[in-house]
Amino acid sequence: MKNKLIIIHGANALSSKNQSLQKLISIIYKYFFNFIPEYNTKNPWIDVFPKLKYEIIELKWSGKIIPYDVSKTSKKLSELLDSNPDKNYIFLTESIGTEIALSAIEKSKAKNIKKIISICPISKPRNIKDFSIVSLKSKNDIFARFSNKVLWPLHFFRSTKGNIEEISLENIRHDQFVPNHKIKKNQTLLELVENKMNGF
């Protein structure tokens, strides 16, 4: 039986049709958050995993960074998990897609959540007990660090604890967490993710 691999993208970058405002947005992203967003691109993680090994599910959502869309998508995902509660689930989440996954799992009756590979995670701090998380972070990801403090100010001094493995990657911006990005001389980010998925 193939494991279900659920891939959840992060929020869309802010944009404007007004050229002057878009230029200002780009400056703020680049010089304040060390982040160079790309617009209207396909999720690069969708077609890189073997379909013979995984049943791949792309959870698409609007990408609008407002609480309603995140909570609405989380509810949709929890219903998906509850429709097949005995399946084995692995998650690959990007940015605030991590919060969508964790919130959905809390609402769900599914028992076979095996692992979450969380790429540049943005999520509310929790205590992880019933499954494991591999969290891939970078000190250069100022955008994620800022977002985690601003979106959940009541949890400012808390961090996610429990069954979690944190991997610190050097010199990677928020937008560079893509499969072919070299994290070592002979290793891409995709190879690291696949290594962490092995055994499920």
Image (tube, rainbow, N blue to C red):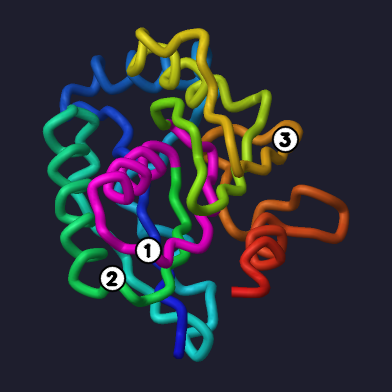
Q: Residues within 10 Å of mark 1 (few under 14, many from 20)?
A: some
Which of pointers 1 and 2 lies earlier in the amino acid sequence? 2
Q: How crowded is the residue under tag 3: few (<14 C-alpha within 10 Å), some, or many (20+)?
A: few
Q: Quadrant of residue 112?
A: bottom left
Q: Which residue is mark 2?
A: 85
- Mark 2: which secondary structure? loop
Question: Does residue 139 sit above or below 175 in this rendering?
Answer: above
User: Going by the image, does 8 lie left or right of 193?
Assistant: left
**In the orientation shown, which residue stands out farthest toward the right?**
185
Q: Earlier in the sequence, mark 2 or mark 3?
A: 2
Residue type at the position of mark 2: Pro
- x, y (%) of residue 84? 25, 74
Q: Are marks 1 and 2 in contact (CB under 8 Å)?
A: yes
Q: Earlier in the sequence, mark 3 or mark 1?
A: 1
Q: Position of residue 9 (x, y in %)?
A: 36, 50
At a point 49% along the width and 23% down the height, the residue shown is 143
Which quadrant is the N terminus positioned in? bottom left
Callout 3, which amino acid?
Answer: Ser
Residue visible at 36% across and 59% down? 42
Say whether residue 18 is left or right of residue 20.
Answer: left
Q: Is residue 43 above or below residue 158?
A: below
> For the magenta stretch, what is the residue range?
95-122
Mark in the foreground, 2 or 3: 2
The residue singled out by tag 3 in the image is: 168
Q: Nearer the viewer, residue 126 or 51?
A: 126
Mark 1 lies on a secondary structure that is loop
Q: Are marks 2 and 3 in contact (CB under 8 Å)?
A: no
Queried whether the magenta region covers residue 119, the answer comes back as: yes
Whether residue 126 is in magenta: the answer is: no
